[in-house]
Image: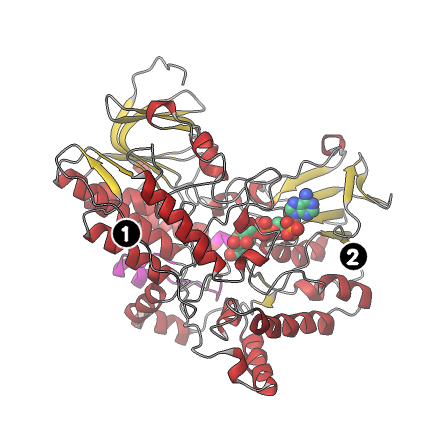
Amino acid sequence: MPESSAAPTNVDALIIGAGFSGLYQLYCLRDRLGLSAQVLEAGDGVGGTWYWNRYPGARCDSESHSYSYYFSDELLEEWEWTERYPGQPEIMRYLNHVADRFDLKRDIRFGRRVTAARYDDAANRWHVETESGEHYTATWLITAVGCLSSANVPDIPGLESFAGAWYHTGQWPHEGVDFTGKRVGQVGTGSTGIQAAPVIAESAGHLTVFQRTANYSVPARNAPLSPEFKRYCHDRHDEIRAVIKDTPNGHPFRIAARKVFDFPAAERQEIYEKAWEKGGLQFRASFQDLLADKAANDTAADFLKGKIREVVKDPETAAALSDIDHPYAAKRPPIDTGYFEAFNRDNVSLVDVRRNPISHITPKGIVTADGTEHELDVIVFATGFDAMSGALLKLGIEGRDGLALKDAWRDGPKTYLGLQVAGFPNLFTITGPGSPSVLCNMPVPIEQHVEWITGCIAHMRDNRIERIEPEPESVEKWVAHVNDAANATLLPLAKHSWYLGANVPGKPRVFMPYAGGMKRYRDICDDVAAKGYEGFRLDGNDEKSAAVGDFAPAGSTDSPGI
Ligand code: NAP
């Protein structure tokens, strides 16, 4: 790390990122523990993922009353969401409200992109440098950089020659993009592309969707919230909190305690129809074995493919859209507002780039392998993220003895509980690889991690413990457990999934999120803490943790994530 001339800013804790995680972590460390803490944030405002993802149609797939902090009753009482799913602008208003209400912005340094973070063993301090050359030091370094924040722009030959404009959805211009009358090409049909396409189609002259992997989608059925529902949320937030903390995915609904083949086909169909009408991610919760039993999953997959063929009028387009190669919900299942219907518009067409791959880009547009040049004015890359590990690796983190995180993770990310990495003392990774994170309604795992980290730091301070880091053996056991949990489900059957890192060329194929369920994970973390931080090495006094035991295998009734 280059030496900067100005004296460093020294604090107890540095937090990187001012999204859902960073805001709550700052509040906990500063206002609950009384530590000096600062947040370094690359953007010019709070919001994290939502600060950057301003693409047309950007909206959360979690229902608004659960996509909230639950740590403060006052906050729950005073905030009122307006729609079933919060749109990006409303989430930004919410997070700004939280930051202002708890007076957090005074300890957030905006426009600070972290470029290096080095651990000084002798002084037991982290030294952090920003792009602008500022230097900070801290005892604890906490990453709150989000799981889906490192944009994946595909390396397509000729992109630099394109004469029109191109954008990645995760780095969307704040002033918006005017598509009126333009020929737009959208690459990607994940949750983002499925949200963006119908909105872009409304103003574009023509929209060409380049689809590599066909995807399932269930209607979101977004709508304004009724006064009755708003009252229910206010009056019953204790009950809602209890549900989101108790369910495997942190959503405000329970997974139905029934199995697919306990019902005759006609009854199953009725259950799916009702779930389809209700809309949203709850479709996945129609039966408990949808992600454990391939034959059970096939019934849901067939139902959803049938819906695509029903909605989309052109048989060739319908066939390409419903030619889906993975079990339902083995990739993160999108929900939509008029996605398949958009293909019935005269100004929308589909190009199947699995059969006919993109070969290169010219000044005029995208050329596919069959030699067709699709002439375009604008290209929208809805091509996702270098998920979970990408944003962490960009921070330039070096642990003890100069060990670079990118070297420690050469074969894929390895953590203990998704919270810490061996060789990186006092570094905590909120919703890091190996934690349930993206398989859940995100505020729930975020609050759990922030509270666990806060408890751990309080324990260290109260017991004069200077360093905490996992024993290498605990990391090995946890990584094996994460793999076992994934292998107990159908999730690894989706070969092109970002859960596996398969969307980024050259990225090691490792199943990154913990699929054993949020409730089980919370219990494991609580148990580890209760046993004196079992599996961690605690230095600075005489305390040394016991070696971690084996983790019980995930049971077949544990429903993994969506
Ligand atoms: P994604 O799920 O990774 O989808 C990216 C899409 O781009 C896929 O269709 C992918 O095809 C395609 N793609 C990538 N590289 C390509 C290439 N070189 N050529 C052609 N196609 C290519 O990314 P995302 O849609 O941004 O979603 C990521 C995650 O963010 C979601 O799964 C979800 O967890 C979260 N998200 C949430 C919301 C919400 O709550 N509303 C909204 C958006 C996103 P392959 O499938 O073949 O790789």
> Residue 470 in the image: x percent, y percent?
30, 40
Residue for point 35% across, 74% down: 232
Q: Secondary structure at mark 1?
A: loop
User: Is residue 69 highlighted in magenta?
Assistant: yes
Residue 438 shows which numbered tag? none
Please identify the quarter of the rendering in which residue 22 is found.
top left
Q: Amino acid at mark 1?
A: Gly
> Residue 183 in the image: x percent, y percent?
77, 47
Of 93 and 364, nearer the camera is 364
Of 506 and 243, nearer the camera is 506
Quarter holding the N terminus is top left
Instruction: Please name the predominant secondary structure of the magenta segment in the image.
Output: loop
Q: Residue furthest top?
A: 5
Q: Secondary structure at mark 2?
A: strand
Residue for point 23% across, 41% down: 30
Would residue 102 be seen by someone viewing this image from the given angle?
no
- As drawn, 247 above or below 58: below
> Residue 314 in the image: x percent, y percent?
81, 67
Q: Earlier in the sequence, mark 1 or mark 2?
A: 2
Front disc: 1 or 2: 1
Would residue 545 be seen by someone viewing this image from the given angle?
yes
Of 502 and 126, nearer the camera is 502
Q: Is residue 519 left or right of residue 151?
A: left
Q: Residue tagged by mark 2? A: 349
Q: Which residues are magenta?
A: 68-89
> Residue 444 in the image: x percent, y percent?
36, 57
Measured in 3D between alpha carbons, the distance from the residue under mark 1 to the one under mark 2, in whole angstroms, is 55 Å
Q: Residue tagged by mark 1? A: 549
